[in-house]
Image: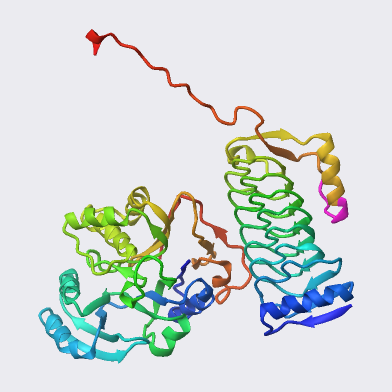
């Protein structure tokens, strides 16, 4: 275990230090983050990094392997284009979390903002609190689990993937081109596995799943010309 | 980018400092210019005007003296090339619009604020540059709005910086994050109604449009903002303040952020980002305003 105090350290140097430490250590504790932006971006390896405080924008972007535990809040675009590993945020995050996430798992214990999991392609995203509008918008794959309330237009124009929600009023807040169904037995097992891993005490039975509509996505109306006789015109 | 912030707080003693501290946290959203519009609890008419050169002071005095007497006048150099005039004017409050028009008609003068409660401080650079040069000399305030600018739509000139005011409706101030795509059409339409523009900034159009809706059409702030939402095209998250209200509205795709936190004691905080609320209250869960929404808060 090694401790790294990043107070006053430029971001480039923070990430350079982390890259070196990840190769030699299993556990890294980061002190005085002071909401540093672009923290731990493009990190590879297997280490566990614990941040004692809050981090800023693009935390853990392009993460490929390490486990990142943030004891405070994170800013916008947390886990941007994340590829693998884990991000656990103990408090709230800003908007646009896990955009285009391709793999790995992200757990937000507090609330998140709007457009959470935007254009997600793979991996798992769990939000224990509420999310804002247009969450899971244009999702291509992966799994989003939301335990709290959802904002308007959830799953708007999804192409693939699945969103599990608990909010009883989700019917009123669905986006376009999505279907809402009770959770399937196969999905239940997957969600239970994730809940067990992260010690989330929540029954999976009352979840509902939001999926893209397979057919009838766009209702086209054929143009029907009307022929009128010359005299009527 | 650009960042906006606002605050309704009757109980806080130094609202000007609070708002500047909120804008300091938004410095990464733009440092071309920073401005605050503050609403004081006083009734005398105060003016804040820029001069391209101190030699135009006489011209300014001559224009104002047609309407009333100047007192507590102060002339000082801003952060950049502009000279600032600040002072009280003893005049008929019904003539504020006319005086505003007359001063703006002079090519070397530009009104930043002229009215009974409103004071606008704006200058180039960050919020720290603003307070280093300008003494934010206000008494007890009720509310205020602020802006940090990253110039995209017009030149880097402090007269083109936010908050904008309109001579049509003294007491109205407006900050905008975004761009209008129908600016020239709207400007032509407003100019055909006889409204004159001082700058080539797209936000000035928004200020004149809302002022026109309220003054000439007799609408209240809420219906004026609804009209603006239906008319404006482009990207906008806008906050408008009057002597007793703050209104906010957003375009229907909600491109530009604004988070709002309301406290039980009547305090309301607005900011482009959560971090801008931290100088007042740290670690609160602020909610984002809904797309295409119009909301009004009374002070």
Magenta region includes residue A198: yes
Residue B13 appears in the rendering: no
Indicate the quadrant containing the C terminus of chain B: top left, top right, bottom left or bottom right.
Answer: bottom left
Tell me which colouring the rendered structure shows. rainbow
Q: Residue at x 77, y 51 (%)?
A: A123
User: At which x and y percent is residue B26?
Assistant: 52, 73
Which portion, as a residue range, is magenta?
A196-203
For the image, the number of numbered tags is 0
Nearer-the-camera pick, B250 or B199: B199
Residue B265 appears in the rendering: yes
User: At which x and y percent is residue A124?
Assistant: 77, 51
Q: Residue at x 67, y 77 (%)?
A: A11
Q: Quadrant of residue B247?
A: bottom left
User: At which x and y percent is residue A158?
Assistant: 64, 41
Extreme residue in the left direction: B66
Left or right: B17, with B58 as reference point: right
Nearer-the-camera pick, B273 or A25: A25
Q: Quadrant of residue A86?
A: bottom right
User: At which x and y percent is residue B227?
Assistant: 33, 49
Magenta region includes residue B155: no
Majority secondary structure of the magenta segment? Answer: loop
Left or right: A193, with A169 as reference point: right
Left or right: A139, with A47 as reference point: left
Left or right: B10, with A156 as reference point: left
Q: Residue at x 33, y 56 (%)?
A: B221
């Amino acid at each position: 275990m090694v401790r790294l105090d990043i107070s006053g350290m430029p971001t480039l140097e923070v990430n350079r230090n982390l890259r070196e430490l990840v190769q030699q250590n299993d556990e890294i504790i980061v002190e005085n983050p002071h909401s540093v932006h672009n923290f731990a971006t493009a990190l590879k390896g297997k280490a566990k990094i614990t941040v004692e405080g809050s981090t800023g924008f693009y935390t853990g972007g392009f993460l490929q392997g390490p486990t990142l535990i943030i004891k405070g809040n994170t800013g916008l675009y947390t886990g941007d284009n994340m590829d693998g590993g884990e991000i656990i945020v103990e408090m709230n995050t800003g908007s646009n979390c896990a955009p285009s996430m391709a793999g790995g798992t992200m757990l937000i214990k507090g609330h998140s903002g709007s457009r959470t999991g935007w254009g997600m392609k793979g991996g798992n995203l769990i939000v224990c609190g509420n999310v804002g509008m247009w969450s899971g918008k244009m999702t291509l794959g992966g799994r989003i689990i939301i335990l709290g309330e959802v904002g308007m237009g959830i799953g708007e124009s999804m192409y693939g993937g699945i969103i599990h929600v608990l909010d009883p009023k989700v019917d009123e807040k669905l986006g376009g081109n999505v279907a809402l169904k009770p959770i399937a037995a196969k999905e239940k097992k997957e969600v239970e596995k994730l809940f067990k891993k992260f010690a989330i005490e929540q029954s999976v039975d009352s979840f509902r799943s939001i999926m893209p509509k397979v057919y009838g996505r766009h209702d086209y109306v054929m143009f029907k010309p009307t022929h009128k006789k010359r005299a009527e015109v | 980018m650009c960042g906006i912030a606002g605050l309704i707080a009757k109980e806080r003693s130094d609202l000007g400092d609070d708002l500047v501290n909120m804008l300091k946290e938004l410095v990464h959203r733009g440092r071309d210019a920073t401005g605050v519009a503050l609403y004081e609890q006083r009734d005398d008419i105060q003016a804040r005007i820029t001069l391209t050169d101190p030699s135009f002071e006489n011209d300014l005095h001559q224009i104002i003296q047609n309407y009333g007497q100047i007192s507590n006048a102060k002339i000082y150099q801003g952060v950049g090339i502009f000279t600032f005039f600040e002072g009280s004017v003893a005049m008929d409050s019904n003539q504020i619009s006319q005086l505003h028009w007359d001063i703006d008609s002079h090519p070397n003068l530009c009104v930043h604020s002229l009215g009974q409660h409103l004071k606008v401080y704006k200058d180039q650079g960050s919020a720290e540059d603003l307070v280093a040069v300008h003494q934010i000399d206000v008494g007890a305030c009720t509310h205020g709005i602020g802006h940090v600018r990253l110039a995209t739509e017009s030149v880097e000139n402090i007269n083109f910086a936010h908050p904008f005011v309109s001579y049509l409706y003294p007491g109205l101030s407006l900050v905008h994050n975004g761009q209008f795509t129908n600016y020239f059409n709207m400007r032509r339409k407003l100019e055909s109604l006889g409204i004159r523009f001082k700058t080539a900034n797209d936000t000035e159009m928004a200020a004149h449009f809302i002022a026109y809706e309220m003054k000439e059409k007799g609408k209240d702030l809420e219906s004026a903002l609804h009209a603006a939402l239906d008319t404006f095209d482009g990207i906008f998250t806008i906050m408008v303040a009057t002597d007793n209200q703050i209104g906010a509205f957003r375009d229907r795709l909600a491109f530009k952020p604004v988070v709002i936190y309301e406290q039980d004691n009547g305090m309301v905080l607005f900011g482009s980002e959560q971090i801008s609320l931290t100088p007042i209250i740290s670690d609160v869960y602020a909610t984002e305003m809904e797309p295409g929404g119009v909301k009004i808060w009374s002070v």
